[in-house]
Amino acid sequence: MNNQALEITYHIRGFGQIVYKPTPEWPDCIFEQDANFDVMLSIAERGLTAETDFDSLLMLTDARVRQLVLAWEFQYGRRLQLIRGNATLPSFPQEGGSATITSGVAISDRVEAEVVLAPPPPTMPQVPLGAERWIRTFAEAGDFSDYPEEQLRRHYLIIEELWDAYASRFESVDQTTSKEIGLVRHFVSHAECNSEQVVQFISEHLPSAIVSGRSRPTVRFDRLSVEHRNFVGRRVPDSERIARRLIELAFADQPPFT
């Protein structure tokens, strides 16, 4: 980096192991990972003049790094913490030196992430910022590895929103699977459920969920029951897979920075 560039540092926390091996060599970006597995990115924006709108440029660079972190969160299904460190202006002759314009801006939340050791891609991974709310919901499911009902609920938020737009892109087996995931989501989301379709499906696959003594057939999810949790947990890989595919399909409809 040099004093003719806008230099910005970003810290990304929450990785459980080395992200890339070897270290990426992305243009105008220095990637470092410390002993705690935290990542520091140093990014240089070049070709600047004294008339450059540095605030706007900083916002664009923030967006670029957010796209990178979202790509990691989507890939690994875990949330990360992004913090912008110092951003230093280039020094021009009339300014008499450089100046720090911002420091310590938190951009997202944190949770631990397990990352598979992998070689770096040739270019910095990016996803559209318009997909951020779906990715954040998808990544939140990783917070609940011991609670399959919470994972399935978050996956279904994505399925419920995007399914009608992209259902035709799925095979018939996934059409059926998506419907069943919706029934299980209703099952785990109510203290008791007497929806006819839900009761019929749950009664066939989990008879112990049937509640006796009700005027209408009713089922109830018992989160303390290993049998019930295993029943829901068996649907989580499919709910995750379908939610991920829906987000991927939605990427193409999202402009890069909105």
Image (tube, rainbow, N blue to C red):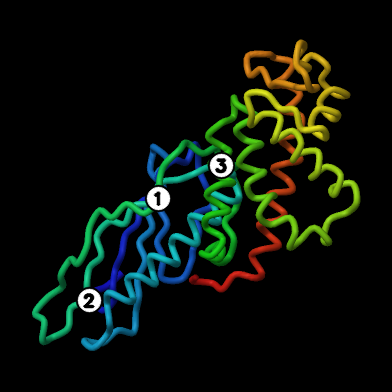
The N terminus lies in which quarter of the figure?
A: bottom left
> For this view, does 204 lie left or right of residue 161?
right
Q: Is residue 199 visible?
A: yes
In the picture shown, does residue 190 fall above or below 83?
above
> For this view, does 187 lie left or right of residue 224?
right
> For this view, does 132 lie left or right of residue 93?
right
Give me the disc on residue 249: none
Front residue of this view, candidates 205 and 253: 205
**Disc 3 and disc 1: Cα gap in Å?**
18 Å
**Image position, residue 138 (x, y; %):** 59, 46
Amino acid carrying mark 1 in the image: Ser
Amino acid carrying mark 2 in the image: Pro
Q: Residues within 10 Å of mark 3 (few under 14, many from 20)?
A: some
Residue under pointer 3: 115
Kindly state the secondary structure of the residue where label 2 is placed.
loop
Residue under pointer 2: 90
**Disc 3 and disc 2: Cα gap in Å?**
35 Å
Confirm or deny contact between disc 3 and disc 2 (CB under 8 A). Answer: no
Give me the disc on residue 108: 1
Kindly state the secondary structure of the residue where label 3 is placed.
loop
- Mark closest to the chain's N terminus, 3 or 2: 2
Residue at image x 48%, y 55%? 69
- The answer to which image quadrant residue 215 occupies is top right
Confirm or deny contact between disc 3 and disc 1 (CB under 8 A). Answer: no
Residue at image x 42%, y 57%? 31
Which is more foreground, mark 3 or mark 1? 1
Amino acid carrying mark 3 in the image: Val
> For this view, does 62 lie left or right of residue 233?
left
**Disc 1 and disc 2: Cα gap in Å?**
27 Å
Front residue of this view, candidates 102 and 250: 250
Kindly state the secondary structure of the residue where label 1 is placed.
loop
- Mark closest to the chain's N terminus, 1 or 2: 2
